[in-house]
Image (cartoon, coloured by chain):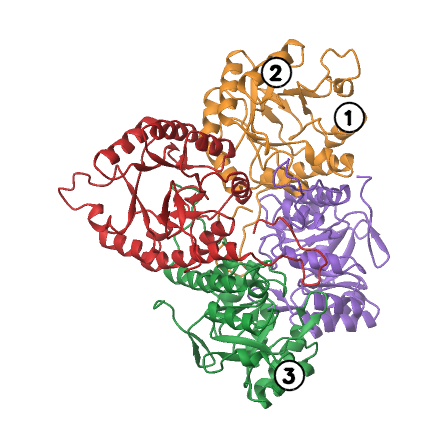
Chain colours: A orange, B purple, C red, D green
């Protein structure tokens, strides 16, 4: 794996381009084992779900902050204000001054509220946070997020918890083509290894996932699968794939196919 | 990678589920480096293209038969007779009594002639060969190949040299669902890492490729990418993926989607 | 075509479920002929592009307001204010108190600014307009548009002028499943007849297109093609399609496949 | 519909490019109504399933041979010999000297036996039949069928009775690009209107279907839908679709995308 360039977000380097969540696991031990198998260095933790006073067993007991970069997220927040409060709380208890902003706008689909996300990002960047917003493939809001100081843009591949894989490949390709200022990370929607590989092949800088690993029949093995898939997709992108043709002796290559 | 079951073909075990060809490389050194990076244990060599008398430099000088399992193939043959002769020649010069049968039926597309493939398979099995035929997703011929003793069935994912990825996922799924007697190997059509991962996720036992690696801008790196992708796809299959839903709170999972 | 239910928007009935634009044609005569061939009853006209004083030849000379329902649109507007002004202008000159709101947020891709679209919709509904906003597949904004009084929701199938067909079928299906208060109309992205048929099969109430017809080699014939495709897709939806199976004797149908 | 060129098979012209089967309907009256609604001129009837002596009610009582061109098919045959016998029987009882050859090679999937199909075609062409063979997307066998005198080549879009739509678009495109001697007709696999439109847009000369209409909730309405879809797809092909772009201002069009 010497052929992996580090992922750099806001000046910080990460060896792995797979970022994993810590929700939906059976227990802390399974969470820990899956995180290790994934090879992820950055791990998200929901501020609202960890036992922050740590008087009793907490998710944090299973995540070694010397080895892992903990990224608090605002899962469960439905307004900019809630997300801002959650971010501040994460910083106050010493978790991090980085935050993944997630503001849900629709309870049925967990689709993000991009406007509230933008507002929260703006406020928190001014307060010195390094903000990684979860958003959609909306290029207009992606640019606005960058304008207000987002350290990365993290569009969904499909709605949270669906496992459908990348649904709007054209939208993702447009983001990749037009956004070069900050890392682009597919966040949500990945269901299996090939989805993660495809995201990397499209040129995304990293992939963030939770349910695909946690709700697999064997989360540890799926975590290992995802580790390989992200490396494979990343290397394939770097390696420069062969041209596509309708058939081998066709005179002209086929261009512009999403996959 | 302790979680990889060995691939067993005709009683022989292979650690890697990636099989690679040796054509189209710049030179022998690049071939050797790509094969090593791929982690493949089984490697195909075209009987008609190797310098069999080995009085001068040969592809075989770069492939260590102690580490690699060389599988002669009949690339370049257009009739059953030519393929049979090539197989026999491969055995006579000590290459192997295994053979990948490839009989091309259409020069423009390199599409296989399944009828001639079946004939050659039948003859060679009777002569004691272990025969791995390259074929299409035609379930009728796949069953006939098994009936005459093929040691595996190797349908194309897309025509040779196109890099289009798996084109007829329904056909491949039908093969996987109805064929359990011998290993099923996707042979041809893979263009990038996610294609290989997808083939494994569909339940194929292995993937055979050549052009996708050899004609990448950086073949060595693409070989490494494919190694990861095959492992990732295989592990994801074993790990049991999460159910798909249209949205997270949808009451029923979505079934039967190819990918 | 007795089997077509009328499309009802804000209490007004339309016989055709195909809505067409009037931009990008060679001349007024071609526009007129294409509109007629399409069978469309509702036709969009860009307020900023028609010659409103009509002292010289105008697009409006070719569109008979007795036969056609002219829907002014705010094409070319980049802010809510511009769109609001354009809508008011369209009403003042007697065009209509209906308006298709289109606020572009990104010049490269012509992707809509959903926030500005929402603001313009809110203002114009209060002023008595019947507002049909062009938007994305964002379910959060779709619901907000309805909350402020939009008479329909018109998500893009793909970015304007791309002809890529429906790119985010999952997003469109979610909209269809969760939105029942107002008509849903695919607006932009259709490239050919099957795209339009598919939109109707997904349950959309109508399809709006311009480039696919105007920039076909033969716009008049493409208009006729689209007329048939929209009717075919609509009838197929109503007729209730056969269940899908992996193969005919498979014991269980396949559910949830987008197409 | 003045813009429809007639479909010409073996010198005979047909106004409609939709060919429909007559199996799986509730009764003769429904069959008749669906055929009429489809606008089809050529209609297939299974030789083995019609009551040929016509002493009692027969499917043929509902199909007016003055208006419809009856094409006997060999549905239910599993060998070349059975198919040949069925074809001869159809001619003997005065049905037709045309025949659609269908030889099933796999009972579970109803996948055709292309080798037996080729043999039956060869024999029957010599006996003066006009033979339309049902086959796969195998280009090698497609060319052999033409070589022995087939009047058309009719590849499956998906296995019979599955309704999955066109599964191997690359294979179908290759057929269309390389076969120009005889009409190409998609036979089997269509599930809904957009599938039929797509087949025509790919350049196929006609579409043959049965289950998609007969097993729709409302077969008559689905027949009408398919009539429109085939016309729409055909006209769209003729009209010359707009170029695809990733976004409107992208400098180069996207080529070679299947759909």
Q: Position of residue C66 (x, y in %)?
A: 24, 50
Q: Secondary structure at mark 3?
A: helix
Task: Tell me the quarter of the image containing the N terminus of chain D.
Answer: bottom left
How far is mark 3 from mark 2, CA to CA? 76 Å
Parent chain of label 3: D
Residue identified by numbered label 3: D86
Residue A10 shows in the view? no
State the residue lying farthest toward the left.
Answer: C55
Which one is in front, D235 or D192? D192
Q: Secondary structure at mark 2?
A: helix
Residue identified by numbered label 1: A32
How far is mark 2 from mark 1, CA to CA? 24 Å
In the image, residue C136 sits, relative to residue B67, either above or below, namely: above
Task: Tell me the crowding category of disc 2: few under 14, some 14 to 19, or many 20 or more residues within 10 angstroms, Cα based.
Answer: many
Q: Residue at x 63, y 66 (%)?
A: D160
In which quadrant of the rendered view does residue C105 lie? top left
In the image, residue D116 sits, relative to residue C233, either above or below, namely: below
Count of numbered tags: 3
Residue identified by numbered label 2: A86
């Amino acid at each position: 794996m010497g052929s992996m360039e580090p992922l750099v977000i806001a000046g910080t380097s990460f060896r792995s381009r797979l970022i994993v969540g810590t929700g939906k696991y059976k227990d802390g031990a399974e969470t820990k084992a899956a995180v290790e198998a994934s090879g992820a260095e950055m791990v998200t933790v929901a501020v609202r779900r960890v036992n922050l006073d740590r008087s009793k067993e907490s998710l944090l007991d299973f995540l070694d902050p010397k080895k892992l970069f903990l990224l608090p997220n605002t899962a469960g927040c439905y307004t900019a204000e809630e997300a801002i409060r959650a971010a501040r709380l994460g910083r106050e208890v010493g978790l991090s001054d980085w935050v993944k902003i997630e503001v849900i706008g629709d309870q049925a689909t967990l689709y993000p509220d991009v406007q509230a996300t933008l507002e929260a990002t703006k406020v928190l960047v001014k307060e010195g946070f390094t903000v990684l917003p979860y958003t959609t493939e909306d290029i207009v809001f992606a640019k606005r997020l960058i304008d207000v100081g987002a350290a990365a843009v993290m569009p969904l591949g499909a709605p949270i918890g669906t496992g459908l894989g990348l649904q709007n490949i054209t939208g993702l390709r447009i983001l990749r083509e037009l956004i070069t200022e900050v890392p682009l990370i597919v966040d949500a929607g990945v269901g299996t290894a090939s989805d993660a590989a495809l995201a990397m092949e499209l040129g995304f800088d990293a992939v963030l996932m939770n349910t695909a690993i946690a709700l697999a029949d064997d989360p540890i093995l799926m975590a290992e699968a995802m580790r390989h898939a992200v490396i494979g997709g990343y290397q394939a992108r770097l390696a420069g794939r062969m041209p596509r043709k309708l058939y081998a002796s066709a005179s002209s290559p086929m261009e512009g196919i999403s996959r």
